[in-house]
Amino acid sequence: MKIRLLVLNFLICGTVLATDNYNYQGLKYTGSKQKILIWGGETGWFGQEMVKILTKLGHTAISAKSRLENRQDIIAEIEAIKPDRIVNAAGVTGRPHIDWCEDHRPETIRANIIGALNLVDIAYTYKLHMTNMGTGCLYDFDEKHPKGSGIGFKETDDANHYTSFYCASKVYLEKLLLEYPNVLNLRVRMPLSYDFHFRNFIIKITSYAKVINEPNSLSVLEDLLPVAVDMTLRNLKGSYNFVNPGVMTHNEILDLYQKYVDSSFKYVNFTIAEQDRILKAARSNCELDTTKLLQEYPHIPHIKASVEKALLAMRKIKSQQIK
Ligand SMILES: NC(=O)c1ccc[n+]([C@@H]2O[C@H](COP(=O)([O-])OP(=O)(O)OC[C@H]3O[C@@H](n4cnc5c(N)ncnc54)[C@H](OP(=O)(O)O)[C@@H]3O)[C@@H](O)[C@H]2O)c1
């Protein structure tokens, strides 16, 4: 059954490009057209999508060629292109997943810490605003933020999730990054999209032999990447929990997947303790407080409404593919 699903997803991913389902409502920037240089714009999931959104909005988006660890190359590229702002959507995320970082710590530090700091430090010198696509996987539910309480971690709460080296690298980065006054740091977590992209959280959990069932904050790219672009254009600064409001459990998502996309789909749960035994590093499960983000962008829909829309869009892609 899992093989059938993987083949279906492969066929759909391989032949259908994501349609533009981006939610452009609620954006606020009204200034002149800007030139944005994006690290990760050439091959990265978020970076490529941000290039598309900026282009659609009439701005000039350029994918950076320099590597984050090569300071002189970054300086040369900024001197040559003279961007109005820059975006860091680059970093090592590990393949097939973040467990890769456990055994590649120097490489992870080089890109995710030294590289990102290089970029922000150079941007500061050139008086450029930098948006960093960061992570919200910095927390685990705790006594003050218990599971199911609706009390999410705020941007000002100290991180408490250090069990995976990937996340630890992001905790260390965020602390230093926010010492710079020119940075917007967007804390994305468990990103999903309205298509069959292999990194889509929905696709990931449908491919697992067993899956945990925990409530989590998630980021729907169709809602949030246009907002990331708008926040960049507006020169907003500081850290923002960059997720849709509310939480959803794995089972809630998979039940909707079964309802809308594949009625024959079945899944099996296991506990976090059992999951920890098959992974190199324990994963973060948490709820993030979205008050700060919603003050700027109150239109961002609740996660349950957006996941339902995502699955309806995926059903449409699947039905077009099968015709
Ligand atoms: N996807 C997620 O689940 C998730 C969740 C939260 C946060 N984030 C963060 O958001 C950022 C973007 O994520 P993503 O999913 O779009 O990542 P992705 O698809 O894995 O792309 C990463 C990009 O970073 C580039 N890159 C890696 N090392 C580099 C280096 N040393 N110098 C220059 N470019 C380098 C890669 O270019 P090459 O192909 O040329 O190496 C690629 O374009 C990452 O920092 C990630 O940690 C991702």
Image: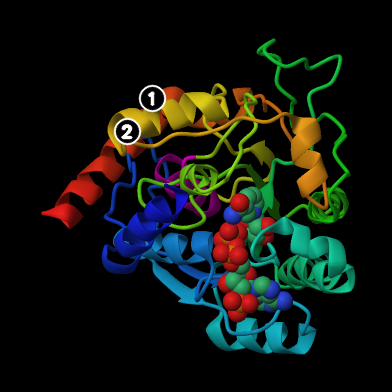
CB atoms of marks 1 and 2 within 8 Å: yes
Packing grade of label 1 (10 A; few <14, some 14-19, many >=20) is: few
Q: How was this image coloured? A: rainbow
View extreme (top): residue: 149
Image coordinates for residue 16, horizontal then vertical, percent: 27, 62
Marks 1/2: CA–CA distance: 6 Å
Looking at the image, can residue 275 be seen? yes
Front residue (pair 98, 255): 255
In the image, is 35 to the left or to the right of 242? Answer: left
| Point 81% across, 32% down: residue | 273
Q: Confirm if mark 1 falls within 8 A of ligand 1.
A: no
Q: Amino acid at mark 2?
A: Lys
Q: Which residues are magenta?
A: 220-233
Q: Is residue 237 above or below residue 79?
A: above
Q: Which residue bears the numbered disc 2?
A: 309
**Which quarter of the picture shows residue 34?**
bottom left
Q: Which residue is mark 1?
A: 305
Q: Is residue 316 left or right of residue 250?
A: left
Kind of residue at disc 1: Ala
Horizontal side of 292 relative to 105 (left or right) equals: left
The prevailing secondary structure element of the residues shown in magenta is helix
How many numbered discs sit on the rendered protein? 2
Q: Nearer the viewer, residue 317 or 171?
A: 317
Give the structural element (helix, strand or loop) at label 1: helix
Residue 234 falls inside the magenta stretch: no
The quadrant where residue 210 appears = top right
Q: Position of residue 213 (x, y in %)?
A: 62, 27
